[in-house]
């Protein structure tokens, strides 16, 4: 096979937040699948914030390998089987994104069976939000829920999920007035907290005057600090991300310190826990079944920002970090 394809490599480890110049689009021969491998022509892949951590090298406790200069980026991808032990033409989900063609092991591919009406929805990041809101911070009828980073891949689904599980009021934070309007207009958020528009605790007191019962946190930092002060007795906090530290220009992506008033945690009986899908192996299948049903009935939307063409991939992670996407960031090949 003499044909070539394109892939995205890391040029150097950034001194701060990555820019498009830290990546390069290379053209190389299409790989030949080895025994047990599948040749897949990718159609879509996800740009996820965790790449910042993998590039920064602070990968302790992260179940993914670090990325070094010269390495090809990777991440969740959807593609069509071209050759190998799986049936040609089948759509599969795998982890070798950031390239036109991939050669994952057949055992590492998941055949897409039509559970979701649109294959691209398999790149949605709602499983963590659903698991956290059903396993850790269980939503009760009438709860007020605060979602930090509400315009991100997790947050845009988290608010909708909370509502479908019975929340009476859903508040979200974002850093953009336009995104704040979209959260309320398109995704049913009742109120928003705007980062940079004044003290978070004062905004949160106005957005949730009766206090907060549940926090689905993807950010950490001052937003998590403020949420503790706004929490009602018995409030449940589920941490599913730490973007405040992960996307900080002063850190390498592997730490996210936050100040928490432990006196409030104690006197109000607040519980706080981090969510890991590996601790709840049944949540993924349950989420996907409900997600498919909700998509078909129109009860939920899957918001994402498309980047059309792999030539736009080098700019996609910096764009995501800069907050210029709404929902998931997906490359369409």
Image: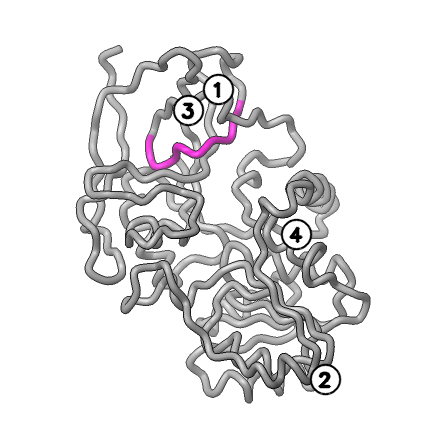
Q: Residue at x 23, y 51 (%)?
A: 20
Q: Is residue 161 left or right of residue 98?
A: right
Q: CA separation, marks 1 and 4?
A: 27 Å
Q: Are the residues tagged 4 and 2 within 8 Å (C-beta)?
A: no
Q: Is residue 306 positioned above or below 180 on the image?
A: above
Say which quarter of the image contains residue 52. Answer: bottom left
Kind of element beneath mark 2: loop
State which region is magenta: 91-99
Q: Which residue is mark 4?
A: 131
- Counting residues from the start of the chain, the first of labels 4 and 2 encountered is 4
Q: Which residue is mark 1?
A: 106
Magenta stretch: residue 98 in it? yes
Q: Is residue 63 left or right of residue 132?
A: left
**Disc 1 packing (10 Å; few <14; some 14–19; many ≥20):** some
Residue 218 pos. (x, y %): 51, 63
* Quadrant in which the N terminus appears: top left
Q: Which residue is mark 3?
A: 104
Q: Residue at x 26, y 30 (%)?
A: 6
């Amino acid at each position: 096979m003499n044909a070539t394809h394109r892939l995205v490599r890391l040029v150097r480890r950034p001194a701060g937040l990555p820019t498009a110049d830290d990546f390069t689009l290379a053209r190389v021969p299409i790989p030949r699948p080895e025994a047990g491998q599948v040749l897949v022509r990718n159609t879509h892949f996800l740009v996820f914030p965790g790449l910042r951590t993998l590039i920064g090298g602070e990968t302790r406790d992260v179940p993914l390998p670090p990325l070094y200069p010269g390495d090809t980026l990777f991440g969740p991808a959807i593609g069509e089987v071209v050759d190998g032990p799986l049936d040609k033409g089948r759509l599969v989900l795998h982890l070798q994104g950031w390239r036109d063609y991939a050669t994952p092991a057949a055992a590492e591919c998941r055949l897409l069976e039509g559970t979701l009406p649109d294959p691209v929805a398999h790149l949605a990041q709602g499983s963590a939000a659903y698991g956290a809101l059903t396993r850790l911070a269980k939503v009760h009828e009438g709860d007020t829920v605060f979602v930090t980073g509400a315009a991100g891949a997790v947050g845009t689904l988290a608010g909708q999920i909370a509502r479908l599980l019975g929340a009476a009021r859903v508040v979200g934070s974002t850093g953009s007035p336009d995104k704040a309007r979209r959260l309320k207009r398109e995704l049913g958020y009742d109120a928003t907290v705007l980062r940079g528009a004044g003290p978070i605790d004062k905004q949160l007191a106005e957005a949730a005057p009766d206090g907060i019962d549940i926090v689905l946190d993807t950010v950490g930092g001052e937003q998590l600090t403020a949420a503790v002060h706004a929490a009602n007795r018995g409030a449940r906090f589920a941490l599913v991300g730490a973007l405040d530290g992960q996307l900080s220009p002063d850190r390498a992506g592997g730490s996210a310190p936050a100040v928490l008033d432990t006196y409030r945690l104690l006197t109000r009986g607040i519980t706080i826990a981090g969510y890991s899908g590996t601790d709840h192996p049944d949540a993924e299948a349950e989420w996907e079944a409900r997600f498919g049903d909700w998509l078909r009935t129109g009860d939920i939307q899957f918001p994402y920002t498309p980047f059309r063409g792999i030539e736009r991939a080098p700019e996609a992670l910096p764009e995501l970090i800069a907050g210029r996407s709404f929902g998931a960031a997906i490359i369409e090949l």
